[in-house]
Amino acid sequence: MQSFSATTCFTILVSISAFVSCNAQDQCGDILTAGIHNTYQQISRDDSRAAYQQALCDQNSSLYNSQSSTGGGISVFGIGGADAQHGQQEVNNLYHSHCENQQKQLSDDDFNSLVEVTIDPNIVDNWRECMQANGKGLFANVDVNGAALTFTLDFEGLPGVNEAKILANPQVQGAVCSSSQFRAGIKLAAKVDKTELCERLGRNSVTFVVNTSAGSKTLKLAALPDLTPRSVKYRPHDMSSPAFDNLNTIVTRTPGSLEDKLVIQFELPNTLPIPRGLALPLTFHRILVYGSQNFPAGPGRPFPEWNPLPESTFPHVDGTWKTSDKVSITVDIPKQFSDPSQGWDIRFCVMDSSSGCDPSPNLLLGTPI
């Protein structure tokens, strides 16, 4: 169970104007601790507070970027909705309080506030319900480990009542439970955990409902997002040199964790941007991919800067092609070179029989098609 300091044994919850005991903090706090791991599988229970503190004070972290929760770094849940706007405001307020001047450790209350806006809202609802009950009565939780779901029931007792009875077999949607630990007639002794292991069906949302003599409990898990990298197809353009469009280039870009994969399709030109007095059709024998980081002149930089990558950064492609041939090549762009807003410019050029090289537009910029 998660521990809390003695100074916070009594807390007034947002929208819950009731005092809760230190036992409830400990019992119900485990719901939030499990909720962090359920939403962000890479964060262990023991490291959750440190991971949140680090994400909060690093404004380059996913907590400040428009990324969806689950599967990635800590982020505000439900990007794009009204709740997410409230969550982002909460994050900004906590940043000003704990990180702006001198980093301060998150209090239990502030840690809970940050967790609330970054995990599945269904888990937050379960935690609030537990806190309202002051840690008494029927306690329920779910722990996620990949596709494996472990449901826990724990009867914490009520005045004069030392056990609860399951009245009907639980209703489960979105998962399959092979055992029957929670079948009708089973008795739950006070303060004795009982668990049921189930398997999630694909990425489906999950609902678990159980009715007992001590009341009912509903546990929910949101559907998992599809984290398959999504490709985007676009036509590169270079407004400074419209003639570059003569290659009729189309790029399909698929993001990856370390590299972005670019599938580049183009047509070898039958006219050249710079006439060389050569007869057509031309023969082309090498495709070069190259890049640079460029900065315009500005404050503190009296002249534009052009910083080319080493020629060995990208392998060249050798072959024999003629005018109007359609060609496709694949290039992996390391993440650190892939952001055009940071001045990165990645291009290819095709060497012809005159040793001239016809360049493409910047492959990192373009118009979706």
Image (cartoon, rainbow, N blue to C red):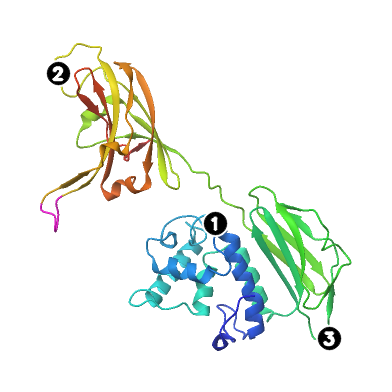
Of residues 99 and 288, the one drawn nearer to the viewer in this rendering: 288
According to the image, label 3 marks what residue?
160
- Secondary structure of the residue carrying tag 3 is loop
Which region of the structure is painted magenta?
A: 297-302
Q: CA distance from mark 3 to mark 1?
A: 42 Å
Displayed quadrant of residue 349: top left
| Residue placed under numbered mark 2 in the picture | 276
The image position of residue 280, as x and y in percent, is 23, 11
Q: SS for tag 2?
A: loop
Q: Which residue is mark 1?
A: 70
Q: Amino acid at mark 1?
A: Thr
Q: Is residue 298 magenta?
A: yes
Q: What secondary structure is marked by label 1? A: loop
Give the amino acid type for the residue marked by disc 3 in the picture.
Gly
Q: Residue 300: image x %, image y %?
A: 13, 58
Give x and y (percent) for residue 287.
Answer: 30, 26
